[in-house]
Image (cartoon, grey):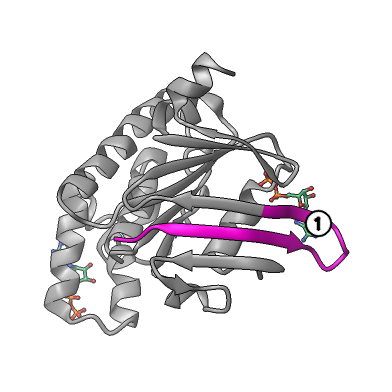
Amino acid sequence: MARLSLDKVEKVYPNGFKAVHAVDLEVRDGEFMVFVGPSGCAKSTLLRMIAGLESISGGELRIGERVVNELAPKQRGIAMVFQNYALYPHMKVFDNLAFGLRLAGVAKAEVASRVQHAAKLLEMEHLLDRYPKQLSGGQAQRVAVGRAIVKKPDVFLFDEPLSNLDAKLRAAMRVRLTELHRTLRESGQPATTIYVTHDQVEAMTMGERICVLKEGVIQQLDTPIALYERP
Ligand code: ADP
Ligand code: ADP
């Protein structure tokens, strides 16, 4: 479990464009934080800096008590879920879930137990023997989420994970992911989450707090109810 803090975090791209301007933010331990805003407001830049996929030009990024500015993605204790799922097509679901753990040298029994636990949480025990091409879009997205859960990260990062799904499935997955977050937190497992979306309904229904970004600065940061009452 861990909180995540940004202290005057900046991003200047190599072409000189300043995409993020001295952002201060604290995501509380176990909190579900949504980043929302129009295309180009720097949602992905911020998320990618937190993940370690993009360098930080200034300021300090901490996960728990650790400054992670210079750490490789694998050393940060984060797990990221992408919109394109990024499943390995030649591996069964079980192995898609297990692969990263096996690489990290996690013992076989522990791998199996974490995979079963994630499969149960996401109600996909019956899918473990399938290949990705045998899954629906919603099922594939659950596997992608499961792959993050088995890692037991300090922080979950979601990058527009539902944008490839149709409206009905998207609504169902919003509920499922919200419930999953609550289940993890209530059972004392790591649950700190940053969820990026350009969809205001997603932001308002899923976020415990919402960080509204505009042109690389935080424009508003509040609960959905407060934002609704004072838009
Ligand atoms: P969002 O995810 O909110 O759509 P991005 O984080 O992708 O926004 O982009 C934020 C701003 O940074 C945009 O103006 C974008 O054009 C710019 N940007 C993104 N990547 C690069 C890059 N590699 N070089 C220069 N500018 C970039
Ligand atoms: P090995 O390490 O010898 O390959 P594993 O125990 O890792 O053996 O599993 C062999 C195959 O069986 C895996 O590739 C996986 O697809 C499948 N498998 C293993 N455990 C389960 C499980 N609990 N549920 C479904 N499939 C499983």
**x 15%, y 57%: residue:** 117
For disc 1, does the CB lie below 8 Å from ligand 1? Answer: no
Q: Secondary structure at mark 1?
A: strand
**x 13%, y 66%: residue:** 113
Q: Quadrant of ligand 2?
A: bottom left
State whether residue 126 is above or below residue 205.
below
**x 43%, y 30%: residue:** 170
Dominant SS type (magenta)? strand
Q: Quadrant of residue 219?
A: top right
Find residue 95 and report its horizontal and vertical position in percent.
29, 67
Is 15 inside the magenta-drawn segment? yes
Find residue 131 and report its horizontal and vertical position in percent.
33, 57
Q: Which residue is mark 1?
A: 18
Find residue 129 and report its horizontal and vertical position in percent.
22, 58
Say whether residue 81 is left or right of residue 176: right
Question: What is the magenta range?
Answer: 1-22
Residue sitting nearer the eye, 223 or 201: 223
Residue sitting nearer the eye, 170 or 149: 149
Report if residue 126 is visible in the image.
no
Q: Quadrant of residue 173?
A: top left
State whether residue 102 is above or below residue 44.
below
Residue reaching furthest to the bottom: 105
Quadrant of the image for the N terminus? bottom left
Find residue 151 and report its horizontal and vertical position in percent.
31, 66
Residue reaching furthest to the right: 15
Is 92 inside the magenta-drawn segment? no
- Total marks placed: 1
State whether residue 11 is above or below residue 120.
below
Amino acid found under the numbered disc labelled 1: Lys
Say whether residue 83 is left or right of residue 191: right
Q: Quadrant of residue 106?
A: bottom left
